[in-house]
Image (cartoon, rainbow, N blue to C red):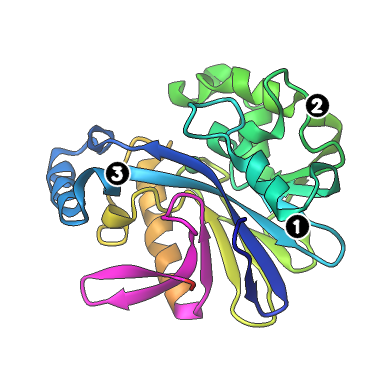
Amino acid sequence: MPRTFEIGHIRITPLLDGDLDAALDKVPDPVDRAAATELIAQAGGDKALTMDCHAFLLHLPNGPVLIDAGTGTMMHSRLGHLHKRLAETGVKHADIRAVYLTHVHKDHFGGLVDDAGVAMFPNAEIVLHEVEADFWFDTQPENMPERARGTLHMNDKAFRPYLDRIRRVPEGGGEAGIAARLAPGHTPGHTAWVIETGAEPIIAWGDVVHLAALHLVRPQTAMIYDLDPKTAGETRKAMLEWVVSNGAIVAAAHMDHPGIGRLRRDPDRYSFVPLS
Ligand SMILES: [Zn+2]
């Protein structure tokens, strides 16, 4: 049974979809790669290269919503457990009224559909930042980086049954208490969703951090997971600082389960302190 956390008047349940392996050859710069290799070794080696994959369930008075939707059947067999986790909470798929996407990558949208392409959330609207929607849905493929172009067939499968209920929101948009905040670099419209709680805000920041052992120490280390690594590094640095300065609670897609906690600023790094 997934654990639910209460923060102010908000109840949030991290849903663990599974895990996936990162690799240090995804750090293109040789100097950065050497530093990364050392940090990963200090943090326990291979296990520091495994990224948990979370979506988050928000229990709101006007009905439950998800932030991201897991991988569904679009990746490998260690992933795709979101639907089981959701069922364990007692919330029905048909009750989910909205899915807020942090960005359009298959480990975040794959679970929108089953293997046959049928919508898993028959009554949900899909909410995403207009910058992200413009990039993935309105850009000619020949104007996209190669890496982005390669996944378009999966976007097509996942979003097809939702085409008449995709809501594109501007910066700050969402709904009462949930606001889009552009966090670009990983994708052009990569979005952190800021959730008001009446206490500390929660920031569901998607893929701002991939490898905690690396990025909490060297935020600007580029990895090729990011479409624009330089911008992603600047976003990461700014976002880490914002979280600490605002005492915010992070809900992170790829940090260790439960993926929800605070950040502490130490002399040489940020440290993630999971909520207990
Ligand atoms: Zn991701």
Instruction: Name the foreground residue: 33 vs 146.
Output: 33
Secondary structure beneath label 3: helix
Label 2 to label 1: alpha-carbon separation? 21 Å
Residue 23 as seen in the image, left or right of residue 76: left
Mark 2: few/some/many CA within 10 Å (<14, 14-19, 20+): some
Label 2 sits on residue: 161
Q: Which residue is mark 1?
A: 174
Type of amino acid under label 1? Gly
Residue sitting at x 39%, y 48%: 210
Secondary element under disc 1, as helix, strand or loop, is strand
- First to last magenta residue range: 245-274
The reply to whether residue 140 is in sight is: no
Which residue is tagged 3? 49
**80 or 102, which is in the foreground?**
80
Q: Residues within 10 Å of mark 3 (few under 14, many from 20)?
A: many
Name the residue type under label 2. Answer: Pro
Q: Look at the picture and state if 250 lies above or below 129.
A: below
**Which residue is pictured at 85% across the width and 36% down the height?**
122
Amino acid type at image mark 3? Leu
- Asked whether 97 falls inside the magenta stretch, the response is no
Tag nearer the camera, 3 or 2: 3
> Looking at this view, is 98 or 151 the one in front?
98
Would you say residue 225 is visible in this rendering? yes
